[in-house]
Structures are given as C-alpha cells and as structure tokens.
Amino acid sequence: MNIFENAPQTEPERQYYFIDIAKDLLKKEEEKAGRKLTFHVTTFGCQMNARDSEKLSGILERIGYIKEESEKADFVVYNTCTVRENADNRVYGRLGILNGYKKKNPFMRIALCGCMMQEENVVRKIKESYSFVDIMFGTHNIHELAELVVANLQTNAMTVHILDHGQNPVENLPIDREYKFKTGINIMFGCNNFCSYCIVPYVRGRERSREPKAIINEIERMVQDGVKEIMLLGQNVNSFGKDLDPVMTFSELLHEIDQIPGLERIRFMTSHPKDLSQELIDEIAVSKHVCHHIHLPLQSGSSRLLKDMNRHYTKESYLDLVDRIRKAIPDVALTTDIIVGYPGETEEDFEETMDVVRKVKYDSAFTFEYSPRTGTPAASRPDQVPADVVKTRFDRLLKEVQKYGRERAKELEGSVGKVLVESMNREDENLVTGRLENNSVVHFPGDASLIGSIVTVKLTECRGFYYFGEMVSE
Ligand code: 5AD
Ligand code: SF4
C-alpha cells in the first residue's frame, strides 16, 4: 500500500494520519536503538518563530519523541531567521557542531525550517555543503512536519519540501506551549509592506488574516488550559482583517478578545506606525486587559530616509502619533526598532534619529546595524555606509537609548504594579521572576507556587532596566 496515495487530502486529517504512521516508524527506530528517542527545537529570530516552534514541538511530542534540553537529541530542528546576515551565519556555524553530534549518533536526524529555507541560494548551499541535513521545509508548510518525518524515516534520503506562497493556515494541530500561562497566537501571516531593506515579505509571503472565530476559539481553549497572557502576533497587526470578508479592524478584534472571561493580559506585536489608527489607541485606552505597551518601530528619524525605506510616514507624523498615544494612554510604555547605517544615511539623517529618541524617550529600543539582504532594493544601492561609520553611530545611539531607558525605569521605582510570575529566579532560589504590564522584569521573594499567577508588587529598587520588589497584599 502506498501510504502517500492513501493519505487524506484535507487538513488537519492528513497530518494526524501521518502522525500515526510516524509513531510506528519511530517505535521501530527505538527498537533498533534500544532506547527512547528524543527531540530538540532551537528557535532563531522573532516571536512568530517562537510560536511556530511550539507547533513543531507539539507534533514531535505527539509522534512520540521525548523533549530534551540539549541539541544532542535524536531529532533536532533549527527554526531559522534571515532578517539580518548574522542570523544566517549563526545557523551555518552551529550546523557544523550538529554534524559532530550526528557522526556519533546513527539515529540522529537534523531538520531545518523557517525563513532561511525560503531563499533558493540557502537551500542550494545546504544541499551542496551540508548534505548531512535530513529534512528542509519552509515557512508555509510547518504543519507538514509529520508527513516529512514519515518520508524521511522511510527513505533515509534528504527530504525537501518548500512552498513559494502561503495557503490557508491549518488549524487544530497539536501544540506544545513553552509556558503554561502565556503564549503567542498568530492572528495573521505575511507582510505586504516591502520596506526597502526587509526580506520578510519575500520569505513570509503576502498578508493573510486568520478568521476571527478561529482566533477567539483558540484563545478560549488556551484560557481553559491555564493561559493568562497572550501575545497577538503578526508582522503588521494594524492591517489585520483588511483581507477578510466581511472586513474587520484590529481594534474590533481586540475589543472582542478583551471580553474573553479569564484572560488577564493581551499584548500584540508588531504595529506599523502608518496603520496605527486613532480607533485602536482609543480601544487600548478603554480596554480592561490590553497591556499599556506599544512596540512602534521607528527605523529612522529622517523623513528623507523613511521615504526611501517605503515606510509611508514622516518624522513629524510619527511624533504626532506618539503624542496622541501618550495623551490617550498616559502610562503607556513605548518601545521601538531602529536601523543604523541604511544606505545613504548622512550625519544629518542620523541626528534626526537621535532627535526622535530624545523626544520620545523610549522605554527600550532594539537597535540594528543595517544588513544588506540579497533581493531587497536597498541591498543593491551603491551608497552603502562604511562599516566604521555605522559602528560609531550605532554606539552613540545605543548610549542614548540606554540613558532614556534607565530614566524611564527609574520613574517607576517606589510604585506598585501587577506582575505575572514566570519562573524561579535563576541565581537566587528565594526569589521569583516575573514581568510588569510594560514588560519590565521584576525579581522578588516568593516560591514556585506563585508561578503563573498575577500578584501585586512594590518596586523597591530599580537596577538599570529591571527591578527588585516585594509582594504587597491588595
Ligand atoms: N538590516 C537591519 N535591520 C533590519 N530589520 C529588518 N530588516 C533589516 C535589515 N536588513 C529590523 C527592523 C525590523 C526588525 C524586526 O528588524 O528594525 O523592525
Ligand atoms: Fe519588514 Fe516592513 Fe514588513 Fe516589518 S513592515 S516585516 S520591516 S517589510
């Protein structure tokens, strides 16, 4: 019987069919090995990848692999990122180490997936120079892992399946959440913006929103299962729902999610400044559970560069947006992404960025050196900024960003806030560690019974960007 010909054509039924077959094949492998076989998923990159990794883990666990902490496992998945060149280089470097493990373990299999796999030159390079890799798949078919495992276990030949565009997301596959009490949830996939430096639209495809009913149902199930905090994920959540019939805005979705009983915190990521509506600002202000934290990537403070980047806002309109947000939500935490050394960036352009940093006083900022990505318009520009200039500007920016970050953190010293307790403290067994609504980390005396609950904590001491505190009764 040809198991592939007989497989159901509909999802998720097809994948459950392959999970069952993979279970049997795994048992045979385990008999040969004389032990249970294990898996490990390593995530590179963003929250989207972290969520995808939870899906991959869920499928591998359902097949019967045992989760293990180290990469010396029998089935290792690298869920890759390609947003900047150093992300790619880290993967290539670590693959060499994995190959060393594989030489000592005849049962080991290595799978690569995620954004890097959507680039033809990467796939070619892996096939040619890293032929010990067993499975490769892309961002559009992570749900097919069980099917690919079956193909690979049966043939022992490199199994490669990469789709060049997205389809409707496959719902209801097993998921293994990293934390019991918080998780991410995709509300949309892909990006339509084509910022001139960014490779994401090429590797993640066009925007596709999930059906609101499917999102709400999934969150309700998560809450029943102990989730208190969710992060709504999309490359540009502010354009959620434009492709739905009937259309729905992100703030309408947020309003519905805010009503779900038992859900205590709602976060979202990422907002594009050009699409952040007044309606959304007002919704966050009146909502009961949406955290007062907005990640609002600036990229550059120079209107000239913003135009070139295809960002569709100016320095002035960005600052006006920040003013409107702060007016409606005075205690909001603002964070951002900034790129230094975009092609053609002059000292004046860079000073415009510094000016925005001084005016907005971000709670924190991710700062990046510009990294040319093959195939994006900015990469072929002749006026790339010399590396030493980029480095000096980067250091100046980081200093400024950290100065304001410290100042903002200090402002909360002595105040009282709600903390979701996430874990025991890594260094002191008498302390637990959690996060405030603005995402800052707090350490305070407590025990494991507090993990997963939201408690009130006085922030007694600010240490740079984090706090020590003590629990207070309400
Ligand atoms: N070089 C440097 N930073 C980049 N980002 C995206 N593409 C590049 C690039 N080519 C940054 C942007 C984005 C964040 C996720 O990564 O700041 O917001
Ligand atoms: Fe990249 Fe711009 Fe899309 Fe963000 S909005 S993923 S920076 S293209």
Image: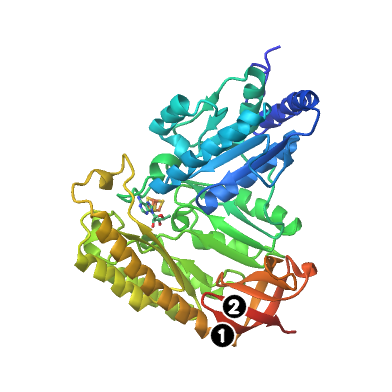
Rendering quarter of residue 304:
bottom left
Disc 2 crowd, CA 10 A, few/some/many (<14, 14-19, 20+): many
Quarter of the figure with the N terminus: top right
Vertically, is 12 above or below 462?
A: above
Q: Is residue 287 visible?
A: yes
Q: Is residue 172 visible?
A: no
Please provide percent x and percent y for residue 195.
33, 51
Location of mark 2 (residue): 467
Question: Are the residues flagged by discs 2 and 1 in contact, CB closer than 8 Å?
Answer: yes
Report the front residue among 387 and 83: 387
Which residue is painted at 77% across and 27% down in the image?
Answer: 33
Please provide percent x and percent y for residue 41.
62, 43
Ligand 1 shows up in which quadrant of the image?
A: bottom left
Q: Is mark 1 within 8 Å of ligand 1?
A: no
Work out whether mark 2 precedes mark 1 in sequence or the reverse, and give the earlier one: 1
Which residue is painted at 61% across and 27% down in the image?
Answer: 148
Callout 1: helix, strand or loop?
A: loop
Residue type at tag 2: Tyr
Quarter of the figure with the C terminus: bottom right
